[in-house]
Image (tube, rainbow, N blue to C red):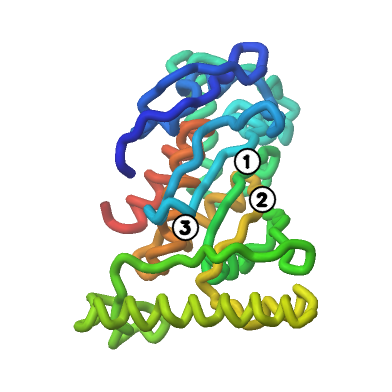
C-alpha cells in the first residue's frame, strides 16, 4: 500500500476520538499508535462529527474505499476471555507488551491460534464502511458466520453511474477454472467494449426509471461492476478466516485489495493476534 498523508483521529486514553492532524499512514493505518490502540474496550465515532480515518482508495480509481468505523476489544480482551476457562485473572486491562503479563498474553494467543481455539477471538468487533463493485460485495457476502452486513438498497436509492473499470484486463487461467492470469492482447479495444457496455446499461436503467419502472426492477439491467456501499462487521475470528481465504494466491485480485486494507487495521488494533496469525500462515506456507 502506497504511503499517503491523511487527516486522522487519534484514540485518547479515555477512549474518545481526538483530531491528530496529519500523519503518515504507511504501515500505521493512519490511526493511533499501537500503544494507544490497546487502550479502551470500545472505540467508536459519531459519523455526523467526523470519521476515524480517511478512506483508502483500494482499487485506485477514486471511487473504491475502505473506512474504519469502530473497534471493540483488544488482545488483552482475547487473552482474558481465554483465561476465564481456568478461573484465572480475567482482567482485560492494557499492559506493556514487554512486561511479563504482556509476554504471557502473546504466548497464550499464539497457542490458541496454533491449536485453533477460536471462541476467545469472538469477544471483539471491527467495523468497516466499504464502497466496492457488486461482484466484490457478492464475494464478501459468502462469509456468513461471525460477520454482519448492511448494504445500500437499490429499492430505496437510485444507483449512480459509478462503475469499476480494471486497469488491467486479465485472461482466463488455463489450469484454475475460477481464476485469471496475464493480460489480454487488445487492451484498448477491450476497455472500449467494457465501458460502452456499462454506459449502455446505465442509459437503459435511466430509461426504465423515466418510463415509470420501479427501482427494484430497473436495477436488473445494471452490470456487476456497479459500485455499492455497505457496512461490514467482523469479530477477529471471522476476520482471520476471511483473510485466510481472500489473501490466498488464488483469490481474485480485486477482493484481495480490500482484504489487505482490512489486515492493516487488524494489525493496528490487535498486534499480538495479527503477529500470531501471520506466523502461522508463514509456517504453513513453508516460510
Q: Can you tell which mark lies on residue 231?
A: 2
- Who is closer to the viewer here, 103 or 27? 27
Measured as percent of width and height from the top left, residue 210 is found at 72, 77
Mark 3, residue position: 244
Q: Secondary structure at mark 1?
A: strand
Q: Can you tell which mark lies on residue 126?
A: 1
**Is tag 2's residue or tag 3's residue first in the polypeptide sequence?**
2
Residue at x 47% of width, y 23% of height: 34
Measured as percent of width and height from the top left, residue 194 is found at 40, 79
Residue at x 70% of width, y 81% of height: 208
Q: Secondary structure at mark 2?
A: strand
Q: Secondary structure at mark 3?
A: helix
> Which tag is nearer the camera, tag 2 or tag 3?
2
Q: Can you tell which mark lies on residue 224?
A: none
Measured as percent of width and height from the top left, residue 66 is found at 52, 47
Characterize the local packing of mark 2: few (<14), some (14-19) or many (20 or more) Cα atoms within 10 angstroms: some
Characterize the local packing of mark 1: few (<14), some (14-19) or many (20 or more) Cα atoms within 10 angstroms: many
**Is tag 1's residue or tag 2's residue first in the polypeptide sequence?**
1
Residue at x 77% of width, y 68% of height: 155
User: Is residue 262 in view from this perspective?
Assistant: yes
Q: Is residue 222 above or below residue 254?
A: below
- The outermost residue toward the left is 185
- Who is closer to the viewer here, 217 or 224? 217
> Which tag is nearer the camera, tag 3 or tag 1?
1
Looking at the image, residue 114 sits to the left or right of residue 238; the answer is left
Characterize the local packing of mark 3: few (<14), some (14-19) or many (20 or more) Cα atoms within 10 angstroms: some
Answer whether labels 2 and 3 touch (C-beta < 8 Å). Answer: no
Spatial CA distance of label 1 from label 2 is: 11 Å
- Who is closer to the viewer here, 85 or 45? 45
Amino acid at each position: 500500500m502506497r504511503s499517503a498523508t491523511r487527516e486522522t483521529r487519534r484514540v485518547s486514553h479515555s477512549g474518545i476520538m481526538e483530531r491528530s492532524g496529519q500523519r503518515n499512514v504507511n504501515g500505521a493505518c493512519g490511526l493511533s499508535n499501537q500503544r494507544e490502540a490497546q487502550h479502551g474496550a470500545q472505540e467508536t465515532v459519531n459519523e455526523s462529527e467526523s470519521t476515524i480515518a480517511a478512506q483508502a482508495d483500494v482499487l485506485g480509481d477514486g471511487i473504491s474505499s475502505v473506512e474504519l468505523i469502530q473497534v471493540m476489544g483488544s488482545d488483552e480482551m482475547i487473552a482474558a476471555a481465554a483465561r476465564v476457562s481456568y478461573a484465572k485473572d480475567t482482567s482485560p486491562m492494557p499492559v506493556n507488551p514487554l512486561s511479563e503479563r504482556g509476554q504471557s498474553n502473546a504466548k497464550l494467543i499464539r497457542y490458541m491460534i496454533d491449536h485453533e481455539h477460536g471462541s476467545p477471538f469472538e469477544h471483539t468487533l471491527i467495523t468497516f464502511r466499504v464502497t466496492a463493485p457488486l461482484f466484490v460485495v457478492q464475494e464478501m457476502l459468502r462469509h456468513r458466520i461471525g460477520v454482519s452486513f448492511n448494504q445500500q438498497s437499490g429499492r430505496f436509492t437510485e444507483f449512480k453511474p459509478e462503475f469499476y473499470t480494471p486497469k488491467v484486463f486479465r485472461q482466463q487461467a488455463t489450469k484454475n477454472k475460477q481464476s485469471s492470469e496475464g493480460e489480454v492482447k487488445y487492451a484498448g479495444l477491450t476497455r472500449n467494449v467494457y465501458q460502452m457496455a456499462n454506459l449502455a446499461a446505465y442509459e437503459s436503467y435511466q430509461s426504465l426509471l423515466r418510463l415509470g419502472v420501479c427501482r427494484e426492477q430497473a436495477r436488473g439491467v445494471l452490470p456487476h461492476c456497479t459500485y455499492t456501499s455497505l457496512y461490514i462487521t467482523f469479530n477477529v475470528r471471522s476476520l482471520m478466516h476471511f483473510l485466510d481465504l481472500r489473501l490466498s494466491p488464488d483469490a481474485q485480485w480485486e477482493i484481495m485489495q480490500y482484504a489487505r486494507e482490512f489486515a492493516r487495521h487488524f494489525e493496528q488494533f490487535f498486534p499480538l493476534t495479527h503477529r500470531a496469525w501471520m506466523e502461522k500462515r508463514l509456517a504453513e506456507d513453508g516460510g
